[in-house]
Amino acid sequence: MTATPAFTCVLDARARLGEGPVWSLDEQALYWVDIKGKALNRFDPATGAARAMALPEEIGCVAPRKGGGFIAGLRSGLWQLDGEGRPVTCLAANPEDQGASRFNDGKTDPAGRYLAGTLDEPKAGGKAHLYRYDRRGLAVLAGGLLTSNGLAFSPDGRTLYHADTPTFTVRRYRYDPATGAVSDGEVFVRLEPKDGDRGRPDGAAVDAEGCYWSALYEGGRVARFSPEGVLLSEHPLPARCPTMVAFGGPDLRTLYVTTASAGRPADELERLPQSGGLFAMTVDVPGLPVPPFDPAA
Ligand SMILES: O=C1O[C@H](CS(=O)(=O)O)[C@@H](O)[C@H](O)[C@H]1O
């Protein structure tokens, strides 16, 4: 197992709960969210320009939309946003108790459908779900979850990866890109909390070799797993809580990772003052392009 290269901070954003990075192939820019800061952010690596667009509620995930604007998972549901990040149309209400549930991690499938799951805030009974949204509406793909996370697809689109962060577990499913149906779920990776290391699988992305990159929340690192679930390498960063990775850049060889600062102990923030920042590193194997959400899918 190798332990290099490492991440450097490309934007000292001081986000409260940075999440949901997604590379816009059209704009060659990175969009990402600050869930607790209620903002959709844009970062242009060519110029270093950063922009924050305020939202009226928490935003957990976002994807560029074919035809313009975005699809986003807010607390109240999946929304179409305009190009300035303003909510335009509620596509599907969050069917859960919105006082205790909000949308969290999301990803488009190879056909342009949107998959997104929720977070059970009291973490009492696993009331969160993973959903699929397409022109047929909202459908449940999995339930009994605490924090739906880690969505990513294999290069052939026939395997869906999905994590439930507090259980330290990533599962994989057979996925039918023609219909968006899932089947045959099984454990892909289960991490063990040990010796004070509570690093657990958060947001993820897959590279062109089919390896699964996972941000380890409270683990201070990003891990790369082979398609068989073997740990291949670990990449530290100066923030305890990385939340999600995304490949970007003209050749998709820049791996971005968002981080959190909210709720972290004061001594940790003093030691790791870039917590909440956006980090990046160059990788050898490029990532897979993530298609935009297609409202016709
Ligand atoms: O709110 C969040 O918290 C989780 C971590 S956990 O559910 O508490 O284990 C984080 O991973 C998630 O992405 C974030 O939105």
Image: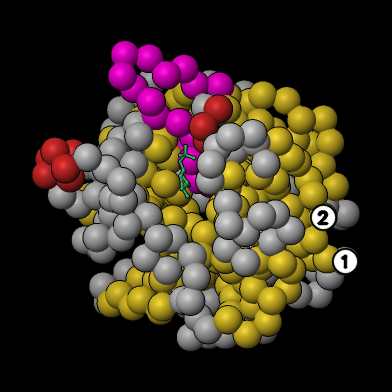
Q: In which quarter of the image is the N terminus?
A: top left
Residue at mark 1? 136
Q: Viewer-proximal residue, 278 or 19?
A: 19
Q: Looking at the picture, which amino acid does disc 2 mark?
A: Ala
Find residue 268 and name its label.
none
* The CB of the residue at mark 2 lies under 8 Å from ligand 1: no
Q: Looking at the picture, which amino acid does disc 1 mark?
A: Arg
Q: Quadrant of residue 45?
A: bottom left
Q: Position of residue 152 (x, y in %)?
A: 61, 46
Q: Viewer-proximal residue, 81 or 107?
A: 81
Q: Is residue 20 magenta?
A: no
Q: Is residue 286 at all visible to an observer of this figure?
A: no
Do residues under tags 1 and 2 come within 8 Å of each other at their CB atoms?
Answer: yes
Provide the residue span drawn in magenta. 190-214
Task: Establish if 242 lies above or below 192.
Answer: below
Q: Viewer-proximal residue, 224 or 163?
A: 163
Which residue is the extreme one toward the top?
195
Q: Residue at x 42, y 19 (%)?
A: 193
279 horizontally vs 155: left or right: left
User: Of helix, strand and loop, which one carries label 2?
Assistant: strand
Q: Which residue is drawn at 38% across and 25% down?
A: 198
User: Of helix, strand and loop, which one carries label 1?
Assistant: loop
196 horizontally vs 123: left or right: left
Residue at mark 2? 139
Q: Residue at x 76, y 30 (%)?
A: 185
Q: Position of residue 272 (x, y in %)?
A: 17, 43
Q: Which residue is drawn at 79% across and 37% down?
A: 174
Task: Establish if 277 lies above or below 267.
Answer: below
